[in-house]
Each structure stands twice: as C-alpha cells, then as structure tokens.
Image (tube, rainbow, N blue to C red):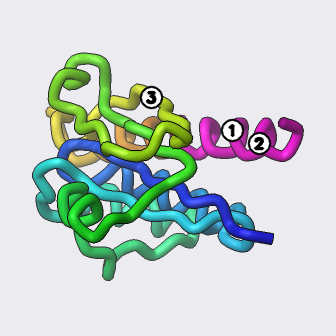
Amino acid sequence: MDKKKVLFVCVHNSARSQMAEAFLKQMAGDRFEVESAGLEPGKLNSIVVEVMKELGIDISQNKTKSVFDFYKQGKQYDYVVTVCDESQAEKCPVFPGTAVTKRMHWSFDDPSSFRGTSNEKLEKTREVRDNIKQQIEQWFKNSLIG
C-alpha cells in the first residue's frame, strides 16, 4: 500500500504545523508520509516543545523547514493542510501542487502570539495542542471511512 503524502503548512513552521505533523506520524505513520513547512521558517517554539513532551512526544530536535524548498525539490502531496489562524489567513502559504492535491484549512491560534504569564501561555498552548490532536484524530478516522 502506498502511503498518502501529507504536508502541514503554517507561517513559521515553529508550532502548529509541527504539532500536526507529530500527531499524524504518531497515530498513522504507517499509512501516511508526513511533513511540515512554513512560508518564513522561524525557530521552534519552546513552549510547544514542552507541551508536546507532556504527551510523550519529543519534537525538540525538529528543524523548521521552508515550503519553498519543498516546492523547488518538486515534492508533491496528496493532502496539503494549512493550520494558520483566520487573522493570518492572508499570510498562510499555499503549496502549489498538482490538481489532484486535496487542500484543507484548519484554523488554530498561533502560540507565538500568546501574551501573559508563562503559565497562561502554557495553558493556551495546551488548548491549541489538544485542538490539533482532536482535529487530526477526526480527520484520520474519516479518511479510513472515506
């Protein structure tokens, strides 16, 4: 069975797309080839690394990657999922691909925009993490049915 190729995209590839990639790899790495990338790759968000470790997923060694590098390499995907929040939708990159690529948009708040105490940022980031996990689980379940 050929693995379906999935690309998660956000602006910096520092938080949301990294979490989505990690969750889908954990749940269904045997069925999907999963990558993530950003329009302007930044630095991996340390709070995201921390909240993922709480669930036993270590992304601390992940690198941020450029969607343009993947494009230049000629990579193609069955699914391209943008995970930017609605307020950043105009900055959220679109990965150019073939007509058969299924594009989806899942809106999640950007942990790098959270303000407040360390504990408040942690709590908000946990909410985003849990929402991403739930979205991945739902999508995966539906992809098995469909």
Which residue, given by chain and number where applicable, does mark 2 sit on? 143
Predominant SS of the magenta segment: helix
Please give the range of residues in magenta.
131-146
Q: Are marks 1 and 2 in contact (CB under 8 Å)?
A: yes
Q: Are marks 2 and 3 in contact (CB under 8 Å)?
A: no
- Per the model, the C-alpha gap separating discs 1 and 3 is 12 Å
- Per the model, the C-alpha gap separating discs 1 and 2 is 6 Å
Judge whether residue 51 can be spotted in this image: no
Residue 14 position (above or below residue 60)? above
35 in magenta: no
Residue located at (70% from left, 62% from top):
27
Q: Does 29 sit left or right of 71 as displayed?
A: right
Q: Does 110 sit left or right of 98 as displayed?
A: left
Task: Inspect the image, locate mark 2, and give the three-letter code of the amino acid beneath it.
Answer: Ser
Q: Which residue is more in the foreground, 97 or 104? A: 97
- Of tags 1 and 2, which is closer to the observer? 2
Q: Are marks 1 and 3 in contact (CB under 8 Å)?
A: no
Check the picture and name the quadrant holding the C terminus. Answer: top right
Q: Which residue is more in the foreground, 17 or 67? A: 67
Q: Name the quadrant containing residue 92.
A: top left
Task: Inspect the image, locate mark 1, and give the three-letter code of the amino acid beneath it.
Answer: Trp
Q: Which secondary structure lies at badge 2?
A: helix
Q: Which secondary structure lies at badge 3?
A: strand
- Per the model, the C-alpha gap separating discs 2 and 3 is 16 Å
Check the picture and name the quadrant holding the N terminus. Answer: bottom right
Residue located at (16% from left, 30% from top):
91
Which residue, given by chain and number where applicable, does mark 1 sit on? 139
Residue located at (80% from left, 42% from top):
141
Q: Residues within 10 Å of mark 2 (few under 14, many from 20)?
A: few
Tell me residue 24's x, y (percent). Answer: 60, 58
Residue 42 position (above or below residue 120)? below
Labelled disc at residue 105: 3
